Image (cartoon, rainbow, N blue to C red):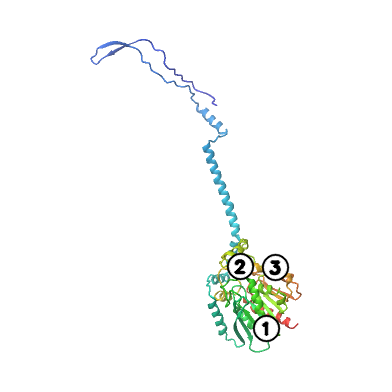
């Protein structure tokens, strides 16, 4: 290994001593004397020969050893293995972090979109944040009181209670023009979380054109029975609507009847008229922003909804609720809606959301069966229900008497948009065209 060495040093042990040694010693008084003794046998430890390294050679040896391979002891191997385990763990955590960010990306994008909406979105979010669950008695008293306080002299507004075959009590009301001939009937069904009284202005506009109007609060809404904002079965709501329609027709024999439904109310009406017995009873239907296709806020919601709806049907699942998304471009209309105690502003209940997903899925599979004449209206900027689904209804329905109107940039609550008068006129023109045929 080394290029040069210094001379070696060699030490031997136990040299052979002489037999007798003569010694001379002087004591303390200055006298000298001679004596003899055998030499002591002293053991000398052997020192093995070793080289003394030249400094230049040491540097060369160090450089040579750095290029050679390194052998690890068992302790070092363990430490390296632990180091690798930590690196693997960090890599796994990094991958999980990326996946989590991807899952949260839709929510982050939705927040950015809400901020861009400006004042309209802030008003909606503010009103939705105040949620109070009122019992049936309180809600019904409010609904009855509003009917009694309506002092419009052009309209006779009345309320009634309708008992369903399921034993539930539904709140209903009617609007009838004081003067003029009644040309037809309109039975309207409100959307999710609202009530029939919100369509008071629309009902009076219909009265002015010769239509008598009936409205029913479906289960869990307005003045009707049920936990506020909770719908255990939309099929029950469909059944209640059929019974209410038959009751209205029995009270007004000979008058042509139309059905109007908004959002989820539109989905209920659309499923009701797929029944041939109901189809023959109506002249046509009008749908605004119908809930034909409603996607959950995240794919996981659609997976867990059937499980949660069975075990925890009344649980309020905030992640499935599209709170903060404006439904009208009119700030005053938003304030009026979300400050109304009869409008449910809490998080959607799991069973209710699951029922909406079920009925929208059913309708998408059966659009080709729609034979009743209809007018469907939708805002292209609607973020609650899908305007493309309304297009699909128009394309696939087998009836020849169908019309569609898409309003560029309008939101979900069409009858509460700034252009509401124009939209009401479009609806009334279509109704009149069916009566004149």
Query: Of helix, strand and loop, which one carries label 2?
Result: helix
Quadrant in which the C terminus appears: bottom right
For residue 230, which quarter of the picture? Answer: bottom right
Closer to the camera: disc 2 or disc 1?
1
392 relative position to 137: left or right:
right
Question: x and y percent of residue 232 in the render?
Answer: 60, 70
302 relative position to 133: left or right:
right
Question: x and y percent of residue 67 in the render?
Answer: 57, 33
In the rendered image, which residue does mark 2 sit on? 353
For the point 60% across and 84% down, the residue is 158
Q: Which mark is residue 130?
A: none
In the rendered image, which residue does mark 3 sit on? 364
Query: Of helix, strand and loop, which one carries label 1?
Result: helix
Question: x and y percent of residue 45 in the render?
Answer: 42, 21
C-alpha distance separating marks 1 and 3: 32 Å
Question: x and y percent of residue 31 in the render?
Answer: 24, 12
For the point 56% across and 31% down, the residue is 64
Closer to the camera: disc 1 or disc 3?
1
For the point 55% across and 32% down, the residue is 65
């Amino acid at each position: 290994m080394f290029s040069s060495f210094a001379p070696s040093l060699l030490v031997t042990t136990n040299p052979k001593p002489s037999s007798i040694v003569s010694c001379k010693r002087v004591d303390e008084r200055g006298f000298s004397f001679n004596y003899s003794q055998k030499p002591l046998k002293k053991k000398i430890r052997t020192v093995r020969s070793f080289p003394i390294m030249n400094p230049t050679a040491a540097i060369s040896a160090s450089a040579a050893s750095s290029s050679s391979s390194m052998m690890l002891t068992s302790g070092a191997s363990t430490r390296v293995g632990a180091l690798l385990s930590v690196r693997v763990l960090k890599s796994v955590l990094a991958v999980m972090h990326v996946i989590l960010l991807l899952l949260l990306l839709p929510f982050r994008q939705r927040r950015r979109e809400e901020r861009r909406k400006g004042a309209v979105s802030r008003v909606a979010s503010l009103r939705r944040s105040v949620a109070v669950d009122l019992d049936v008695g309180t809600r019904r008293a409010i609904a009855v009181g509003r009917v009694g306080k309506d002092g419009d002299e052009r309209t006779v507004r009345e309320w009634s209670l309708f008992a369903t075959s399921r034993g539930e009590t539904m709140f209903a009301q009617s609007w009838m023009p004081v003067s003029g001939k009644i040309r037809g009937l309109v039975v309207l069904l409100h959307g999710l979380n609202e009530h029939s009284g919100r369509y008071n202005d629309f009902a009076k506009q219909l009265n002015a054109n010769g239509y008598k109007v009936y409205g029913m609060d479906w289960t869990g809404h307005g003045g009707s029975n049920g936990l506020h904002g909770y719908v255990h079965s939309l099929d029950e709501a469909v059944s209640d609507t059929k019974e209410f329609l038959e009751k209205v027709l029995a009270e007004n024999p000979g008058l042509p009847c139309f059905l109007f439904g908004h959002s989820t109310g539109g989905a209920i009406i659309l499923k009701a008229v797929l029944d041939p017995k109901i189809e023959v009873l109506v002249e046509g239907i009008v749908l605004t922003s119908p809930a034909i296709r409603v996607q959950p806020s995240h794919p996981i919601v659609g997976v867990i909804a059937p499980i949660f709806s069975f075990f925890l049907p009344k649980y309020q699942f905030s992640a499935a609720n599209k709170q903060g998304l404006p439904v009208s471009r009119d700030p005053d209309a938003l304030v009026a809606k979300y400050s109304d105690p009869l409008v449910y502003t809490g998080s959607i209940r799991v069973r209710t959301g699951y029922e909406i997903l079920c009925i929208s899925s059913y309708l998408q599979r059966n659009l080709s069966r729609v034979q009743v004449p209809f007018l469907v209206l939708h805002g292209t900027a609607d973020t609650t229900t899908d305007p493309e689904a309304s297009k699909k209804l128009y394309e696939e329905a087998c009836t020849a008497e169908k019309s569609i109107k898409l309003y560029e940039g309008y939101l979900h609550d069409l009858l509460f948009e700034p252009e509401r008068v124009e939209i009401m006129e479009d609806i009334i023109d279509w109704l009149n065209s069916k009566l004149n045929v």
